[in-house]
Image (cartoon, grey):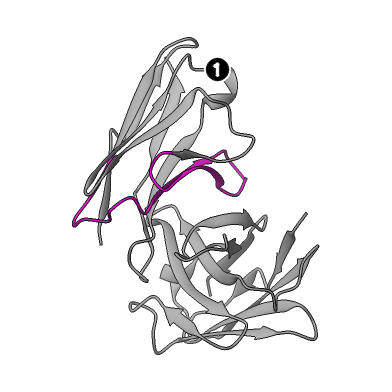
Amino acid sequence: QVQLQESGPGLLKPSGNLSLTCVVSGGSISSNYWWSWVRQSPGKGLEWIGEIFHTGSINYNPSLTGRLTISVDDSQNQLSLKLSSVTAADTAVYYCARHRGGAVPGLFDYWGQGTQVTVSS
Amino acid sequence: IQMTQSPTTLSASVGDRVTLTCRASESINIWLAWYQQKPGKAPKLLIYKASSLESGVPSRFRGSGSGTEFTLTINSLQPDDFATYYCQQYQSHWRTFGQGTKVEVK
């Protein structure tokens, strides 16, 4: 049974840089799956942030490109998110999720429990 | 691709049949999923490819549609079904969700 566990700073100041980690257990992050970050804020609902395949293929939400970096660490079996120059609009619960395998990725079958990120001075 | 769900809130009673609607701004063929979310929890996959039932999900959940119009029907609503439901398209690499429909106790 695949399990995902996010971790992060909880609270950070505007203009700061956000770093989140998602540790994968019960499966290898190097297997043939895509992995995503999704966030949820009261004002914007669920928002897909970006996705990565262990080979390095990446797709980002165009609204976040330029501030966003997603990466995988095979040795630690984890994926990471870095978001720069955060504002209050980045306040949300951040989830990592695994895509179901198959010809058409983008279907999220396993989710982490989520980690709250609050941007406030 | 913009996803629009209706209604925003639906009041219903145990035993009711309820229908939730999701519209896509352009055709997404059958690449649509439905998720159920309860407060403080991650979304849970219910339906994929518009009408395929995820393993372990009760058969009272039924998805239908293709192109731009989709529905999720819950037959004989159970107490555990009061939650918020989201549709999500995965036709485009820019994955997008609807804003959700909250099914609440009437």
- As drawn, is B91 to the left or to the right of A120? left
Vertical order, A95 against A18 (above or below): above
Vertical order, A44 against A37 (above or below): above
Rendered residue at 48%/83% (across/down): A58
Give me the chain letter of mark 1: B
Q: Position of residue A118 (x, y in %)?
A: 56, 66
Residue B55 quadrant: top right
B27 is within the stretch colored magenta: yes
The three-letter amino acid code for the residue at tag 1 is Gln
- As drawn, is B93 to the left or to the right of A97? left
- As drawn, is A34 to the left or to the right of B29? right
Name the outermost residue toward the front: A103
Identify the secondary structure beneath mark 1.
loop
Vertical order, B92 against A78 (above or below): above
Name the outermost residue toward the left: B26
Q: Position of residue B97 (x, y in %)?
A: 37, 54
Task: State which region is magenta.
Answer: B22-51
Q: Position of residue B20 (x, y in %)?
A: 33, 31
Is B87 or B41 nearer to us in this picture?
B87
Quarter occupied by the N terminus of chain A: bottom right
A83 is within the stretch colored magenta: no
Residue B103 quadrant: top left
Rendered residue at 56%/88% (across/down): A56
Mark 1 packing: few (<14 Cα in 10 Å), some, or many (20+)? Answer: some
Vertical order, B103 against A46 (above or below): above
- As drawn, is B71 to the left or to the right of A54? left
Give the residue pinned by disc 1.
Answer: B78
Q: Position of residue B83 (x, y in %)?
A: 51, 32
Rendered residue at 62%/45% (across/down): B41
Residue A115 quadrant: bottom right
